[in-house]
Amino acid sequence: MDIRGHVVLVDDEEIVRQSTEQWLKVCGFTVDSFSRAENALQVLNDSFSGVVVTDVKMPGMDGLELLQEALLKVSGVPVILLTAHGDVDMAINAMRNGAYDFIEKPYVPERLAETVHRACEKRRLILENQKLQQNLVSLSGVDARIIGVSPAIQRLKRELVKLAEQGTHVIVYGETGTGKELVAQCLHEYSHRTKYNFVPINCGAIPESLIESELFGHEAGAFTSAAKKRIGKFEYSDKGTLFLDEIESMPLNLQVKLLRAFQEGVIERLGSNTPIHVDLRVIAAAKVDLRDEENFREDLFYRLSIAQLHIPPLRERLEDVPLLFNHYLKIVASDHDRNPRVLSVQDQSTLIGYQWPGNVRELKNIAIRYSLDPDLSVADILMASEGMPNMSKVHSRELSLAIQVANFEADAIRDALRFHKGNIKLTMEQLDLPRRTLNQKMIRYGINRNDFKS
């Protein structure tokens, strides 16, 4: 049987301890059992990848003391408390102090196995996140600028480094938000032109009447508002790199002047007849294939397309999403002097199941909100930002059954609380749940009845 996780079991009653150990092993867990909490504490360290299951009332160090010491020794380790019926209020308080969950004795074996499995998944995710953070710190060069380990993004980085050294003109293709300007910056930074200016200009954001002056500059008096001489982007990027974003929106009449400048390396400011020689590399970016654009000159396309780079959309490299998301969580945490928020299993699954129409730009915005508001799940933010009545853009078929059931259960509780304006009794009756079970589920899903009272 596949190993589902590592459990440190603590119970001073030998019969209970042995039967619990046997059941957990049958369920596929590896188990180290102890009769005393002090002995169990010795096996815990930062690399511990499992969970602690402990009785509360024991001689010597009890379960609550073990909880405190375990969390001090191993940050974020899940601790599950086994409690007698009269200890439920105490156990709820313990959860507020960091316990993962509590199970009332005599426990249902299947529920114990399910809770331990979820706790192991959480611990595994915490360790994966820590590893991701360590990997991000150790990255250097282009790997530190363009985050990702997917085959598509690794191929892009290899091609980028090659083209940076060659110094040729490049067309960078990619959907909105994929990071075309970042790729252009890397092409500049890893080239021999890095000592000189990287000059970006968005061709689609400048009025047609001004773009020629922006690119080529003008002399004083060249037109009504030209009070003094202006150096254009071409001249400013001499010996460096000129980045023309959304070049597909460049007016046709200006494309002729661009072509001459690229071919001859010469420009003239508006209002001047004096040629100015420029030595620059041009990186153009487009959302569409320029060969298919009727309003884009074929000769200009061939002048620019000495080399091409294609940035994959985020939906084609979903394995990079957790790494990217953690990267932005770390940045936001550093900016606000706090520890990075840890992704839950459910939130990570939602991230991977979403198709990211806004690509990395959208992911970054979601990460900022997620980092700054610990009460929001990824699904909450996506639904709010998209105005969706449901997670139609999250492909539920890509999520595990357990996560789909948990999502449904949490939504059902929220809907009932919303309908009854936070009234717990009416919510219990509608959902046919005992008070204790409803409380446990609300704690598990982070649901607060006060949010539904108005």
Image (spheres, grey):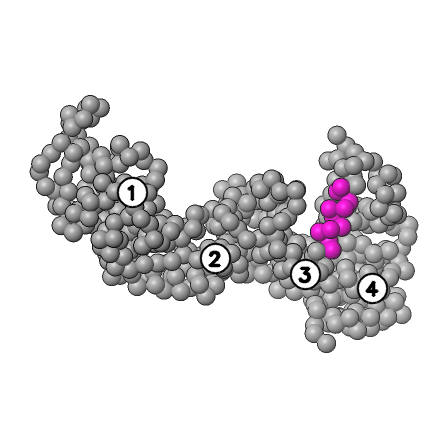
Q: Are marks 1 and 2 in contact (CB under 8 Å)?
A: no
Q: Tell which tag, 1 or 2, sits nearer the viewer.
A: 1
The residue tagged with tag 2: helix, strand or loop?
helix
Q: Who's the residue at 39% across and 61% down the image?
A: 156
Question: Which numbered mark, 4 or 1, is in the foreground of this view?
Answer: 1
What is the chief secondary structure element of the magenta stretch? helix
State the quadrant of the N terminus: bottom right
Which residue type carries mark 3? Ser
Which numbered disc, 4 or 1, marks the residue that appears first in the sequence?
4
Q: List the residue tagged with mark 2.
A: 136
Q: Looking at the image, which residue is at 40% across and 56% down?
A: 311
Q: Quadrant of residue 77?
A: bottom right
Kind of residue at disc 2 = Leu
Give the x, y percent position of residue 394: 61, 52
Residue lying at the far left in this picture: please name it. Answer: 274
CB-based contact (under 8 Å), mark 2 and mark 4: no
Check residue 250 in the rendering and tell me which mark sits there, or answer none. Answer: 1
Label located before the other in sequence (2 or 4): 4
Q: Please state which of residues 370 and 271 is positioned toward the viewer in this rendering.
A: 271
Q: Position of residue 396 (x, y in %)?
A: 65, 56
Q: Nearer the viewer, residue 330 or 221?
A: 221
Identify the element where label 4 is drawn.
Answer: helix
Q: Which residue is mark 3?
A: 400
Give how far apart the Cα atoms at labels 2 and 4 are. Answer: 39 Å
